[in-house]
Amino acid sequence: MLVAGGELLLRARREGYAVGAFNIQNLEGLWAVTGAAVEERSPVIVAVSPGAIRYGGLRLLATAVRTVAEDLPVPLALHLDHGEDLETVSRCLEAGFTSVMIDGSHLPFRENVDLTRKAVELAHPRGVSVEGELGRLAGMEEKSVEEREALLTDPAQAEEFVRLTGVDSLAVSIGTSHGAYKFRGEPRLDFERLKLIRERVEVPLVLHGASSVPPWAVEKASRYGAQLQGAKGIPEEHLRRAISLGIAKVNIDTDLRLAFTATVREVLATSPGEFDPRKILGPAREAMKEVVREKMRLFGSSGRAAG
Ligand code: G3H
Ligand code: 13P
Ligand code: ZN
């Protein structure tokens, strides 16, 4: 069933687990993510980025997700990921999204507050929850202490941001970054900062850039020609710790892409006579589904579908 995103996160925060938000761009992703949610009896957030909207079409993607959600025996929220502007937020509200993110993290504090507050004013009358972001996701290893301070989320500012905007959840920067190359050296997250933010912020916290870049997927893709030297993600024990410290939503995209394309490469290389897309994409979507299932177990959302 389709539910409001805020409900899923409040319960997760209360009960000490996290709901995964999995990015999709097409039907293969939608089947993989919802299939995993059913098999794990887990609540799930289907995330659609502006890039995915440009690729797949807003109405088509929203209709597909909502249609699948209707008959789904587990709760599903349809979420706009990294909403760029109020027009995109409005279009997603029209299309029936039940959760939206407005990402003003690149803006100066006051401008981020203004933009985010306007998104809240658009979404709340429709019962749709809003995620804001404060702090910037970027590799931290080559940064000076001052640069890091400027990029990571400041706990006192986070408290003020939530109070001024009325957001339902807050994405924070504690050392993660998007994509497959998160660290050159030892993976490091600022758990002390997360604790301080948690002490000051009541709403559920969100971790972006949380893919683990599993070695098996990198090895499989590399065996069949991918060039992914130096790819590295967030260790699973770091994610467990972040969830224990108050992260209630964990965003995953890169790991799904890696599992999918590694499998496409494998099928094309091992069955060179194959040209039926279903025989190529079918195994890839199965591999993606298995990754989503593992995440649900790791985040503690498996078995939590019932109210
Ligand atoms: O955080 C961004 C998500 O991974 C979506 O990526 O903008 O390439 O669709 P995208
Ligand atoms: P990854 O690139 O680590 O999968 O992060 C995805 C994300 O944050 C989507 O918003
Ligand atoms: Zn993100």
Image: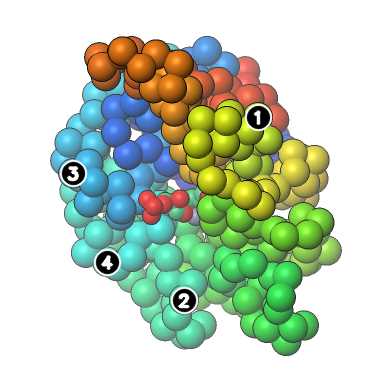
Of the residues under marks 3 and 2, which one precedes in the sequence? 3
Of the residues under marks 3 and 4, which one precedes in the sequence? 3
Q: Which mark's residue is nearer the viewer, 1 or 3?
A: 1
Q: Residue 106: which disc?
A: 2
Q: Which mark's residue is nearer the viewer, 3 or 4?
A: 3
Query: Which quarter of the rendered picture does the C terminus lie within?
Result: top right
Three-letter amino acid code of the residue under disc 4: Leu
Secondary-structure class at tag 2: loop
Three-letter amino acid code of the residue under disc 3: Gly
Of the residues under marks 4 and 2, which one precedes in the sequence? 4
Cα distance between the residues tagged 1 and 3? 32 Å
In the image, residue 106 sits, relative to residue 75, either above or below, namely below
Query: Callout 1: few (<14), some (14-19), or many (20+) C-alpha neighbours within 10 Å?
Result: few
Q: Residue at x 29, y 67 (%)?
A: 85
Cα distance between the residues tagged 1 and 2? 34 Å
Q: What residue would you read off at disc 1? A: 216
Q: What residue would you read off at disc 4? A: 86
Q: Residue at x 58, y 66 (%)?
A: 137
In the image, residue 29 sits, relative to residue 244, either above or below, namely above
Query: Callout 4: few (<14), some (14-19), or many (20+) C-alpha neighbours within 10 Å?
Result: some
Cα distance between the residues tagged 3 and 2? 26 Å
Three-letter amino acid code of the residue under disc 1: Trp
Q: Residue at x 45, y 16 (%)?
A: 270
In the image, residue 32 sits, relative to residue 247, either above or below, namely above
Q: Position of residue 256 (x, y in %)?
A: 49, 35
Cβ–Cβ under 8 Å for marks 1 and 4:
no
Q: What residue would you read off at disc 3? A: 57
Secondary-structure class at tag 3: loop
Three-letter amino acid code of the residue under disc 2: His
Of the residues under marks 1 and 4, which one precedes in the sequence? 4
